């Protein structure tokens, strides 16, 4: 009773919300609003935002992060571009400098990257799982759903009549597909504010951020406050709902057969998650980290509830979420990226701090936005993905292998035959693919598993490069280095001679090189394991993400900021600690789970 006397409840007043134009970020007139209602375009084109309260914590939908620009940081808002777009007429991919068609995307892929399987001596599968999980916080798989489910005819005659169909031609002499009748790989034009009816079609196509643009675990908590997260909360001790099945804890399962988990092999495989974001049922790396972080939220919430019996469910929930987000950001910025980008490089360039105290570089003039280039260049990681998933028991004995691509939209597989235990063990015992110029057979041939007959993820990446309208690779090099590149030989500091020769064979002019193709061919940076232009464009966004996020976890001056002692505890988390706490059957693990055991 005594305790109850001191308890108080926080009310989140939601009233007087205003409607904003998602693209422009401005308050919209009643007349325009009516137009959108009539055209049924409110979902993508309008943000409904409650008035900002400077003392409020991070909103699920990302709004009010920047108090001057309430929609920026929210879902359904535009990307910005590091360099302005370049297109041919009618926003078709640009031609070569001399006015010809660009070389076929598939031809480039097979010419520049070899297929094979070479194990990394440094990184584990866990590193690539994490690398796949992170972008799922900020972007979505809509464009893939588009050609698999909504427009499944792009390689058929009907596809020729639909402007959205942009399939990739396979040449007759393709080194792999010449042994089959496959001459076309499905693809659709990226969804944009234009294709969604928000802005005029005669303007440069602008992509929609369908998640929230900052790293805030949208893939766990969703992006729409009311409906989704309320359905997922238990409204008790700050917990998320969960199921217990065979002694394991899972995100809540769906009872209805919605269009997810399409590859569950019934009747054995039935598990499919009903979470705010469908991401939790997509590709394996995302599914695994989602399950772990779902559990981690509840672990934190329970601890908090024990320590603070007075706290309301709301306060427990939002505090647990804040700690969960901080945990992932700490692992991302301070554990994972230093291995990839090099710790010294990151300290030098101001991405991470060399001290463990607070770091407050918030700048309200920098908008919380994503560059279109950032998630795009992350696709380089497809060259690092290993297609064979290896299963191990908890003593480290190898059991068997299974194709990774066959687990997309197949959450049910994890919940049978102790599969999640064996896959978890494998994640930190198995090597990722080497960081080199070789791509895994499955990524390059059947990247979407049974969802498509054939699919080369990397051909798709090059094609998207062009539909996004990115400037030539050398323009980005110039942005990064302030140097001009006018001949292939100007690249000799960044690219080995044999790969410059490959580029010369397939591109007519150095300015024809596609951004991603250049990144594929680059040497790795000093002190890190990534190509130099990848480094440059990733660092550009990482800094923006940190300084534009009013709720950044290292800040001392933000609503509900951590104390210094609390921040010191956050700084201690590692991915291995996370797995010990919430993964299935992990009794022992190397201290650095992203690195192979035995490496130093
Ligand atoms: C309206 O738009 C939503 C979201 O894009 C869509 O799901 C729905 O089917 C549309 N309704 C009609 C009547 O077209
Ligand atoms: C632009 O074109 C698409 C078809 O590609 C159409 O669905 C959309 O409504 C158009 N938008 C506007 C604003 O005219
Ligand atoms: C994986 O999927 C392919 C179809 O893409 C199928 O032929 C193969 O048998 C599957 N492998 C396993 C082990 O299920
Ligand atoms: C393209 O998509 C259609 C419909 O899903 C499918 O039948 C066809 O096999 C796909 N093409 C390839 C090469 O996978």
Image (tube, rainbow, N blue to C red):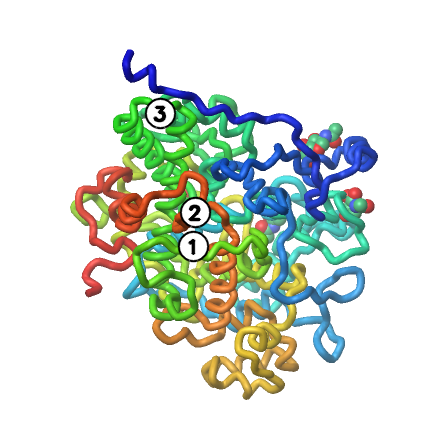
Residue receiving disc 2? 557
Ligand 2 is found in which quarter of the picture? top right
Is residue 408 visible in the rendered structure shown here? Answer: no
Tally the numbered discs.
3
Disc on the earlier residue, 1 or 3 = 3
- Which residue shows up at 77% across the image and 31% down it? 37
Is residue 107 visible in the rendered structure shown here? Answer: yes
- Which residue shows up at 63% across the image and 35% down it? 49
Residue nearer the viewer, 4 or 505: 4
Q: Is mark 3 within 8 Å of ligand 1?
A: no
Q: Could you say where residue 552 lies in the image, as x and y percent from the top left?
A: 44, 49
Find numbered disc 2 in the image and state the secondary structure of the residue it sits on: loop
Q: Could you say where residue 461 lies in the image, as x and y percent from the top left?
A: 56, 60
As measured in the structure, the alpha-carbon distance from the residue carrying label 1 to the one carrying label 2 is 8 Å
Instruction: Determine whether, in the image, residue 545 is placed left or right of residue 271.
Output: right
Residue receiving disc 3? 311
- Which residue shows up at 47% across the image and 59% down it? 542
Find numbered disc 3 in the image and state the secondary structure of the residue it sits on: loop
Find numbered disc 1 in the image and state the secondary structure of the residue it sits on: loop
Q: Quadrant of residue 61?
A: top right
- Which residue shows up at 57% across the image and 67% down it? 174
Q: Is residue 2 above or below residue 596?
A: above
Q: Could you say where residue 325 lies in the image, as x and y percent from the top left?
A: 40, 43
As measured in the structure, the alpha-carbon distance from the residue carrying label 2 to the one carrying label 3 is 22 Å
Mark 3 Cα-neighbour bin, 10 Å: few <14, some 14–19, many ≥20: many
Q: Are marks 1 and 2 in contact (CB under 8 Å)?
A: yes
Residue receiving disc 1? 360
Disc on the earlier residue, 2 or 3 = 3
As measured in the structure, the alpha-carbon distance from the residue carrying label 1 to the one carrying label 3 is 28 Å
Q: Are marks 1 and 3 in contact (CB under 8 Å)?
A: no
Residue sitting farthest toward the top: 1
């Amino acid at each position: 009773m005594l305790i109850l006397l001191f308890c108080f409840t926080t009310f989140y007043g939601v009233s007087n919300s205003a409607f904003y134009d998602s693209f422009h970020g401005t308050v919209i007139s009643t007349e325009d609003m009516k137009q959108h209602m009539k055209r049924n375009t409110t979902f993508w084109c309008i943000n409904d935002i409650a008035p900002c309260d400077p003392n409020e914590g991070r909103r699920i939908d990302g709004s009010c992060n920047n108090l001057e620009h309430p929609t920026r940081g929210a879902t359904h808002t535009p990307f910005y571009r590091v360099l302005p777009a370049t297109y041919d007429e009618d926003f078709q991919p640009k031609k070569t400098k001399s006015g010809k068609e660009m070389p076929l995307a598939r031809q480039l892929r097979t010419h520049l990257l070899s297929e094979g399987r070479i194990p990394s001596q440094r990184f584990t599968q866990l590193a690539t799982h994490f690398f796949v999980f992170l972008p799922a916080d900020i972007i979505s798989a809509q464009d893939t759903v588009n050609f698999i489910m909504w427009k499944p005819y792009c390689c058929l005659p009907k596809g020729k009549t639909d402007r959205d169909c942009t399939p990739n031609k396979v040449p007759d002499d393709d080194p792999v597909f010449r042994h089959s009748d496959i001459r076309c790989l499905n693809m659709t034009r990226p969804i944009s504010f234009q294709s969604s009816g928000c802005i005029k079609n005669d303007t440069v196509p602008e992509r929609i951020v369908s998640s929230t643009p900052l790293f805030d675990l949208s893939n766990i908590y969703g992006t729409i406050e009311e409906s989704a997260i309320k359905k997922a909360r238990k409204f008790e001790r700050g917990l998320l709902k969960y199921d217990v099945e065979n002694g394991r804890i899972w995100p809540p399962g769906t009872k209805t057969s919605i269009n997810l988990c399409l590859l569950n092999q019934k009747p054995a495989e039935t598990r499919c998650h009903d979470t705010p974001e469908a991401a939790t049922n997509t590709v394996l790396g995302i599914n695994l980290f989602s399950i772990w972080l779902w559990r981690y939220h509840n672990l934190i919430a329970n601890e908090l509830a024990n320590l603070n019996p007075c706290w309301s469910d709301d306060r427990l929930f939002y505090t647990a979420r804040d700690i969960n987000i901080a945990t992932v950001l700490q692992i991302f910025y301070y554990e994972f990226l230093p291995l990839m980008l090099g710790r010294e490089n990151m300290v030098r360039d101001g991405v991470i701090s060399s001290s463990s105290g607070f770091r407050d570089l918030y700048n309200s003039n920098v908008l919380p936005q994503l560059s279109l280039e950032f998630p795009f260049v992350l696709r380089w990681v497809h060259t690092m993905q290993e297609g064979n998933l290896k299963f191990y028991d908890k003593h480290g004995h190898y059991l068997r292998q299974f194709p990774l691509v066959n687990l997309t939209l197949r959450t049910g597989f994890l919940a049978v035959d102790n599969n999640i235990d064996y896959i978890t063990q494998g994640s930190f015992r198995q090597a990722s693919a080497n960081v080199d110029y070789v791509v895994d057979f499955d990524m390059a041939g059947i990247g979407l598993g049974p969802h498509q007959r054939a699919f080369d993820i990397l051909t798709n990446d090059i094609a998207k490069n062009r539909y996004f309208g990115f400037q030539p690779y050398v323009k980005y090099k110039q942005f990064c280095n302030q140097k001009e590149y006018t001949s292939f030989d100007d690249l000799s500091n960044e690219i080995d001679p044999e790969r410059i020769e490959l580029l010369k064979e397939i591109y007519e002019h150095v300015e024809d090189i596609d951004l991603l193709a250049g990144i594929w061919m680059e040497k790795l940076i000093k002190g890190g394991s990534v190509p130099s232009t990848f480094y440059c464009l990733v660092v550009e966004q990482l800094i923006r993400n940190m300084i534009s996020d009013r709720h950044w976890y290292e800040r001392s001056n933000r609503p509900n900021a951590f104390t210094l002692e609390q921040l010191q505890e956050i700084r201690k988390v590692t991915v291995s600690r996370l797995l010990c706490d919430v993964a299935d059957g992990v009794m022992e693990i190397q201290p650095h789970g992203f690195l192979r055991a035995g490496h130093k």
